[in-house]
Image (cartoon, helix red, strand yellow):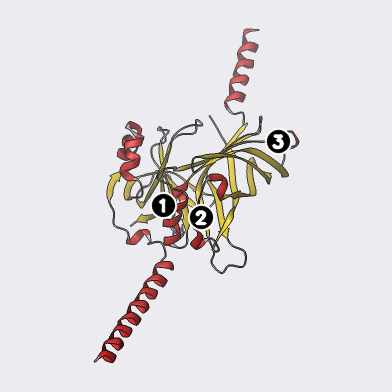
Amino acid sequence: MKKKQIKIVIAIAFIVIALGSVYAYTEFNRKATSTEDLKTEFNTSAAELIVEFEKDSKISNTKYLNKTIEVSGNIKTIENQTGFTIVLGDSANATSIRCSMDSSFVAGKNYTNGQAITIKGIYTGFNADELGIGSDIIINKSIIKP
Amino acid sequence: MKKTIFFLAMIAIVTSAYSQDKYFTKSGKLGFDATVPKSPENIDAVNKAALCVLDTKTGDVQFSCLMKGFEFDRALMMEHFNENYAESDKYPKTVFKGVITNNASINYTKDGTYPAKVKGQMTMHGETKDVEAVGNIISKAGKLQISANFNIVFADYKIVIPQLVADKLAKTAKISVDCLLEPLKK
């Protein structure tokens, strides 16, 4: 009887260790979730988002930080320096939304300035205008919603 | 006479409005590498939205980046970086303010590669420390390509590395800077 109990305990311990190491291994190798699979927490337009940040950037910052948001607006400019950045906003306004595109983004299609698009990404932070070059709402790992 | 003054004034206005003393980018690339030599595990990240402004007249240079903007390959590493080490919620931004010490020897308007020495202060994790770096400035077709490498010591910025991972994480991080600056038009 006792031998059986010991066997069961050993078996359970073995299973726990095995499961634990599998969990540790997958957790360790876990890749960042692709933006496509993230659940959208906020849905807004570029103009509204800019107004919100111009009103109170601190409150807006805490509201959106690390959140997945979808922003619809017109393309202000497209930059291709170190990976693509699509800037949304109005050229008359100094504040704009800078969407740093995910590495999965391929500029196969031609996007033109002024074109209306929807971008999904993770809000990363707000760069206040300290140097006279305009404030920026930074969105990271962005993808374009079809 | 009046015409001449008007004309000269116009030239002055135009040239001052388009004087290309200042260069900037909002999509500079900053690399971060804290891999222990010979370790099979790479600990590196990249930030593609760094801000950089350079005043060619004075040699003043400024960088700033959001800590949350660093992208790691592994999700867990990124979480640890933001939560345990950089404490990105508390200290969202890292700023470097410095000056190019050999600014006079760089001819920004002439195409070419110029070695540059930068001296300044970096504020990260709530701590400000002196930083010196050597890099290159490549002037090409009116744009400036800046590249530099330097090391930072985590302990200087009061970033504590737990004993458990001390052999996986280097005590210093290699920082690489890669920015393409465009003239700032006012």
Mark sitting earlier along the chain (2/1): 1
**Residue at 41% of width from left, 56% of height from top?**
B79
- Residue A65 x %, y %: 35, 46
Is residue B58 positioned above or below B7 on the image?
below
- Residue B128 x %, y %: 55, 38
Dot 1: chain letter = B
The reply to the same-chain question for discs 2 and 1 is: yes
Dot 3: chain letter = B
Mark sitting earlier along the chain (3/1): 1
**Residue at 28% of width from left, 48% of height from top?**
A42
Q: Residue furthest left?
A: A1
Label 2 neighbour load within 10 Å: few <14, some 14-19, many 20+ = some
Q: Nearer the viewer, mark 3 or mark 1?
A: 1
In the foreground, B184 or A41: A41
Q: Number of callouts in the render?
A: 3
Three-letter amino acid code at disc 2? Ile
Q: Quadrant of the N terminus of chain A?
A: bottom left
Dot 2: chain letter = B
Circle 3 is placed at which residue position? B101
- Residue B20 x %, y %: 62, 32
